[in-house]
Amino acid sequence: MGAEKSRCCRCSSTCDLGQRQQAECVEANKIADVEESDEESSISSEADASTRKRLQDSPQQRPPAAPTSNQLFKTLLVKQGNLPLGVDVNHADRRTLMVVGINDAEGLVMLWNRQHPESAIKVGDRIISVNGVSGDAAKMIEVCTTALFLDCAVLRP
């Protein structure tokens, strides 16, 4: 018995995500939709109002303080079509992904950095977990290539 496929995000295909990951993916896309909208939409039901309030109160909506040395911060990258991740990493320690280059012309990291300058990913940062996977650089790379959204914990040295 395989996992049930459902359309949980903006991609044109169906996803084989577990139920928890589907919910997180849907939530991430709701947050992205709120951020992309320039105009307020009228909400008629209490459930919609509750969801909107939760999204507005979400940490994704308020700019966090800029990371300082030895500070951990989170990023949420939502894949869009064939857009590359746009980051080069060194995984020699086999536990983390050290950012050694960022594509300034295209990529999810470039988009994140433009939309979230207060928590931009920079060369020298260490990605210490991706979607809850930590301590194994090879597994984190695998998640980066297969997952539709990337919830990353980044350590600023």
Image: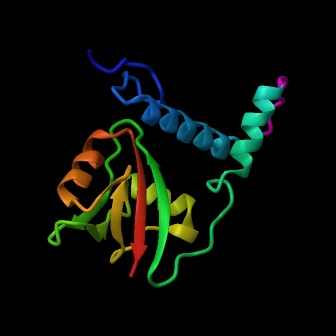
Task: Name the residue at the top extreme.
Answer: 1
**Where is residue 136 shown, x and y percent of the image?**
21, 59
In the image, 35 versus 70, the foreground residue is 70
Whether residue 21 is situated above or below residue 129 in the rendered picture: above
Q: Main secondary structure of the magenta part?
A: loop
**Where is residue 29 shown, x and y percent of the image?**
55, 37
The quarter holding residue 65 reads bottom right
In the image, 104 versus 80, the foreground residue is 80
Q: Is residue 72 at all visible to an observer of this figure? A: yes
Q: Which residues are magenta?
A: 39-45
Whether residue 140 is situated above or below residue 68 in the rendered picture: above
Residue sitting at 61 percent across and 54 percent down?
60
The quarter holding residue 55 reads top right
**Where is residue 30 shown, x and y percent of the image?**
61, 37
Which quarter of the image is occupied by the C terminus? bottom left
Residue sitting at 40 percent across and 73 percent down?
155
Whether residue 109 is situated above or below residue 142 in the rendered picture: below
Tally of numbered tags: 0
Q: Is residue 38 at all visible to an observer of this figure? A: no
Residue sitting at 33 percent across and 26 percent down?
16
Is 155 on the left-hand or right-hand side of 56? left
The quarter holding residue 37 reads top right
The coloring applied to the image is rainbow
Magenta run includes residue 152: no
Is 121 on the left-hand or right-hand side of 124? right
Task: Name the residue at the bottom extreme.
Answer: 69
Residue sitting at 77 percent across and 27 percent down?
47
Which quarter of the image is occupied by the N terminus? top left
**Where is residue 86 shown, x and y percent of the image?**
32, 56
Is 130 on the left-hand or right-hand side of 71? left
